[in-house]
Amino acid sequence: MPQSLSLLPEPVRKLEIVANQPFSEAWAKKYLRNLAEQDDRIEVLKHSEIASEVAKTLMQALRTTSLQAWGRTEALLSEEVIRHQIDPELIDPWAVAKDTHQIYQTALSAYAEQISPAKFSTQIARNLGKIRQNYTAEDPRVIGFISMQFHYSGQILLNLTPPAQQSSLSAYFKVIDDHLYMPLQRAYQAAAEYAYDAPALQAVQKILPLCSEIATKIAERVTQMYPNYQCHTGRLSNTNVQISSVRDIEMFQVYLWVCVLENNISSVQQELFPLCIMLYPRLKVRWELVRQLIHLLGNEIRSRLEPQQAAYFLPYYESLWAMFSSQVLPDSKL
């Protein structure tokens, strides 16, 4: 063994240095990678600790939050309940408060434990489906009141959340909104009645994974078309309005899935249409905007599906378009 690298002949010494470079670089990269992984672990731990503290604080505010949300919902929709002749006995404030408290407690626990929103959605779907089914069993229009109660509860909780944590927590609350506004369990149950290779089911399965992409595209297009429009919550470009817009466009799509899978228009007639009539005027959403999103949705259905698959949707889409036409809902009545 040579005592010094400098004692080696020059060509051999150069070869030895070159040979060691890849190893040295690999070792340095590995060391830095380990540091980065440790930083990530520390960051996850910090985030988990922060999430746990945020969840603990918000859980203590749940009772007050539910009462405040009830007040907002009453202020927004109490006249609509009378106008639509909905039996007030079907809306039990204590039962609604209990359900709201339970669901948001579960959401906050999932957030504190850093369960992913996707996994939380799977865990909570059945409970939210039952809540939705219970409230709509006698009168589907009740879902308008219930969904706004849950939505306002989430908004109030977010306002109590430090800004840095609002985005991550809102993903859990969006799961709640989605399952209450959309008849997802009804769609799942209808799909279960079909053979796997049934053409109608395949048509729905093809467009289903594109739902959010389609909704986002339409929401962005409508925002471009109406840059100065102001609704109840703010401009269409406002982040919360954008989230609500995307959710509503997803909701319209899910109702069309249900129509195709149930082979009738009843879900739109009995639930979606009354829900829109109840909420949109109160939220200062013009029917022109609604017609525009329905028009763009029709374009997406035709462009994303083969003609024979789109044919399953078009009869229900045309009925939807007719129900929201300017002959039925002129903007002057808003």
Image (cartoon, rainbow, N blue to C red):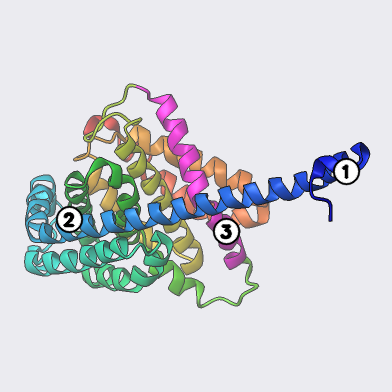
Q: Total marks drawn?
A: 3
Distance of mark 3 from mark 2, alpha carbons?
A: 35 Å
Q: Is residue 14 above or below residue 247?
A: above
- Which numbered disc, 2 or 1, marks the residue that appears first in the sequence? 1
Number of residues whose C-alpha sits closer than 10 Å to that of mark 2, classed few (under 14), some (14–19) or many (20 or more): many
Q: Residue at x 51, y 54 (%)?
A: 37
Q: Which amino acid type corresponds to the residue marked 3 in the rendered image?
A: Tyr
Label 1 element class:
loop
Identify residue type, mark 2: Gln
Marker disc for residue 312: 3
State the residue position of label 2.
149
First-in-chain label (3 vs 2): 2
Looking at the rendering, the stretch of residues picked out in magenta corresponds to 200-227
**How far is the residue under mark 2 from the one under mark 1?**
81 Å
Tell me the element at label 2. helix
Front-lying residue, 106 or 307: 106
Q: CA distance from mark 3 to mark 1?
A: 81 Å
**Circles 2 and 1: CB atoms closer than 8 Å:** no
